[in-house]
Image (cartoon, grey):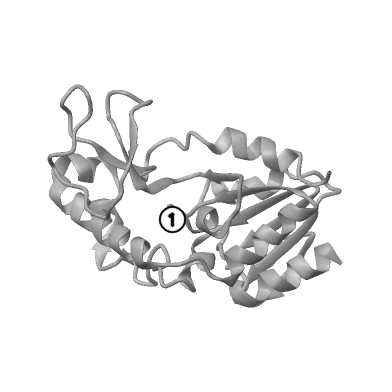
Amino acid sequence: MENIVVLTGAGISAESGLSTFRDSDGLWEHHRVEDVATYEAWQRNPNLVRSFYNERRRQLFSAEPNEGHRQLVRLEEKFNVHIITQNVDDLHERAGSSKVLHLHGELKKLCSETDPFYIVTLDDWEHTSAMKDKAGYPLRPFIVWFGEAVPMIEPAIELCRNADILIVIGTSLNVYPAAGLINYCSPHCKRYLVDPKETSLGIPNGFTFIQAVATKGVKQVVDEILM
């Protein structure tokens, strides 16, 4: 069975009503990234960071997978499909995709700062200061912040090395190390890029470019592959 690897970014979730990563002015929901998405921010003002992610989580609990997410599930009928997502939402899983690797963490989870294996899943959107690990330390968002290592990058690289088909959806390919994953695919790997506009660097070599939003472009790619 051939291997399909799908790399998704904020563009696939935008049509479910979730904000893209940051606006053109460099702000993320009116906050500087340095104030809400770094470990230093968490140390400096944990209440602000909790509030920021609570709002993101509130949006996620009311969001639903869109047709772009659902179309990818069709590929599992005939292919070994792995999704590598830069998104911290769970819309791929809720759509029915069975193998999802999150590069940047998961919004519905919290983790311990002292025990890497202590991870909890929230049943609701609110993360409070009363939520602590077994040692009594406050739980932090299960998010890979700027300046932190990306623990899942090595497994993602291995998936790309073994890909027969790569589909990139809704990402600018400007955020590293995720953007570098396309360079690990073999020369024989068939490549698709689905996005409403070209990346700032143009279309990467070897890619078939589908200029469309995810809800329309993903179906076009999936139909072609399953043809």
Q: Is residue 201 visible?
A: no
What is the count of numbered marks? 1
Q: Hey, what amino acid is under mark 1?
A: Asp
Rendered location of residue 144, percent (x, y): 39, 42
**Is residue 98 shown left or right of residue 46?**
right
Residue 56: quarter of image: bottom left
Return the x and y of residue 209 as percentages of the image width and height: 73, 70
Residue 94 is left or right of residue 77, and the answer is: left
- Rendered-image quadrant of the C terminus: bottom right
Quadrant for the N terminus in the image: top right
Q: Going 36% across and 44% down the picture, which residue do you hit?
A: 145
Residue 92 visible? The answer is: yes
Q: Is residue 47 left or right of residue 95?
A: left
Q: Secondary structure at mark 1?
A: loop
- Per the image, the residue denoted by label 1 is 89
Q: Tell which of 134 and 24 is nearer to you.
A: 134
| Residue 110 drawn at (x, y percent) | 31, 40
Image-based side of 75 in relation to 171, left or right: right
Vertically, is 183 above or below 219? Answer: above
Residue at figure coordinates x 82%, y 68% from the top left: 224
